[in-house]
Image (spheres, rainbow, N blue to C red):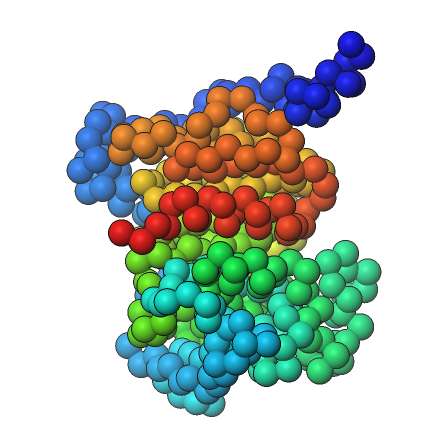
């Protein structure tokens, strides 16, 4: 039988086989169960009381920075409810979060779609969006984002011709709907909850730390463990969760946090720092997200800290060109989610995110899941392209480029259906 035909019949792509060969344990990877003070964690209690806080502090002080927590003066205002949104399929709700309680201060607009065909309270998927709430669906009822909006040409994901003077216009509605399959999400019985990254913190190097949450904490930038934009986004996700705790349509015990790319980096950190999130979906979060720095593949710390000087804390810069000597690696961020379910998704052509590194990272995090008596990632070698493995940690590598596709969502929803079962 011709080899190509054999591979096709057995469901293995050529890359799938190559992948098996390429995916190798990464030498020198820190053991997440090894305590800084010496000794190895052997019980769940030791993990929870000693090692977990130790790792949170390590990543806070060395990578992401220290975030302020829930502002005492923060308020919510529900400014829209439409029970017959999307042709009657969903209830749309929009809420303004006033970070310091002042209606002329920094504001995060939250958009919720709650499925109408199921009895609540319903589980939810919370995720930040790249181009404004209005971009995820053409629904004319969505408030158009008022924060800064980039106007890049030839953006492979969205057409930003609708942007005028770096603000969204009516023509920007639904420009990114392709990446947000609302029908499937609602069809599986989940509410979708989203907010715009720029409402929370500036993603533009020139205006970094001068909008959103950073304006409420100006002094916090004068320290080496200043909270960067990734931490600010994670902080914002926790504020969305604060709101959800007040909304009776949502089952707050079954809320998953989702993010793609830089917003996937933020989703992982949100899940690590906020145990109210019951599950995490990381789509191609790559360097400073799910992948391992130590493999020395894809994007390096130097690039993260110079092209995106606002993403991480100042202290992270000391590790530029020192990937091999890091006192931590990103599998330990995944491990901080244990025993909660987490799905790591990669794309074959997304070389910057080092897909194999994401797989190896998920594998290495499994040690902590095993401590909890869970399997973690049920694979030691890469699964065939476009197929999914799902234990408490899920993983797939799909064909194609850096993106969010229907296949990614199909596996995310399948994974959540398995894990977020009502108790
Ligand atoms: C850049 C960056 C990545 C990031 C990506 C994105 O490519 O280098 O780290 O994940 O942007 O957010 O789209």
Asked if residue 376 can be seen in this view, the reply is yes
Is residue 408 or residue 232 the one in the foreground?
408
Picture layout, residue 349 above or below residue 79: above
**Residue 129 sits in quarter:** bottom right
How many callouts does the rendering have? 0
Q: Quadrant of residue 331?
A: top left
**Which quadrant holds the N terminus?**
top right
Left or right for 3, reference 259: right
Q: Position of residue 137 (x, y in %)?
A: 63, 71
Q: Residue at x 66, y 25 (%)?
A: 11
Residue 326 to residue 122: above or below? above
Measured as percent of width and height from the top left, residue 270 is found at 41, 55
Camera-side residue: 149 or 368? 368
Outermost residue on the top side: it is 1
Image location of residue 87, percent across then percent down: 59, 76
Q: Is residue 21 left or right of residue 340?
A: right
Would residue 170 appear left or right of 214 to someone viewing this image? right
Asked if one can make out residue 108 in the rendered structure from this viewpoint, the answer is: no
Measuring 30% from the left and 58% from the top, which residue is drawn there?
253
**Image coordinates for residue 367, horizontal then vertical, percent:** 35, 28
Residue found at the very far front of the displayed protein: 117
Q: Residue at 25%, 26% (x, y): give it.
A: 40
> Residue at 58% across / 75% down in the picture?
86
């Amino acid at each position: 039988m011709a080899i190509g035909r054999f591979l096709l019949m057995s469901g293995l792509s050529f890359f799938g086989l190559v992948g098996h060969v390429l995916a190798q344990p990464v030498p020198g990877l820190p053991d997440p169960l090894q305590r800084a003070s010496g000794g190895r964690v052997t019980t769940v209690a030791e993990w929870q009381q000693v090692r977990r806080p130790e790792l949170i502090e390590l990543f806070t002080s060395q990578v992401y920075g220290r975030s302020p927590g829930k502002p005492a003066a923060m308020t919510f205002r529900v400014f829209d409810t439409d029970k017959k949104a999307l042709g009657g399929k969903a209830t749309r709700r929009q809420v303004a979060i006033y970070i310091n309680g002042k209606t002329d201060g920094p504001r995060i607009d939250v958009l919720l779609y709650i499925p109408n065909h199921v009895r609540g309270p319903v589980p939810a998927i919370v995720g930040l969006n790249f181009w404004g709430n209005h971009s995820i669906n053409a629904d004319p009822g969505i408030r158009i984002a008022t924060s800064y909006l980039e106007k890049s040409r030839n953006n492979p994901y969205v057409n930003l011709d609708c942007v005028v003077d770096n603000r969204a216009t009516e023509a920007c509605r639904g420009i990114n709907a392709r990446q947000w399959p609302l029908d499937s999400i609602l069809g599986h019985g989940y509410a979708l909850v989203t907010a715009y990254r720029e409402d929370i913190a500036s993603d533009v190097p020139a205006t970094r730390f001068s909008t959103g949450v950073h304006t409420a904490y100006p002094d916090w930038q004068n320290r080496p463990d200043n909270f960067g934009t990734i931490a600010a986004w994670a902080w914002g996700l926790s504020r969305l969760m604060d709101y959800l705790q007040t909304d009776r349509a949502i089952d707050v015990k079954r809320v998953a946090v989702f993010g793609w790319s830089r917003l996937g980096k933020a989703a992982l950190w949100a899940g690590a720092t906020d145990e109210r999130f019951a599950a995490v979906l990381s789509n191609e979060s790559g360097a400073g997200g799910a992948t391992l720095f130590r493999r020395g593949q894809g994007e390096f710390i130097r690039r993260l800290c110079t092209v995106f000087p606002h993403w991480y804390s100042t202290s992270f810069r000391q590790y530029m060109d020192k990937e091999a000597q890091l006192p931590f690696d990103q599998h330990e961020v995944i491990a901080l989610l244990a025993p909660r379910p987490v799905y790591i998704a990669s794309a074959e052509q997304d070389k910057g995110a080092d897909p194999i590194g994401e797989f190896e990272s998920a594998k290495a995090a499994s040690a902590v899941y095993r401590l909890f008596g869970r399997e973690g990632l049920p694979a030691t070698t890469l699964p065939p392209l476009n197929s999914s493995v799902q234990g408490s940690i899920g993983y797939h590598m799909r064909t194609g480029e850096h993106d969010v596709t229907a296949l990614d969502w199909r596996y995310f929803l399948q994974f959540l259906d398995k894990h977020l079962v009502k108790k």
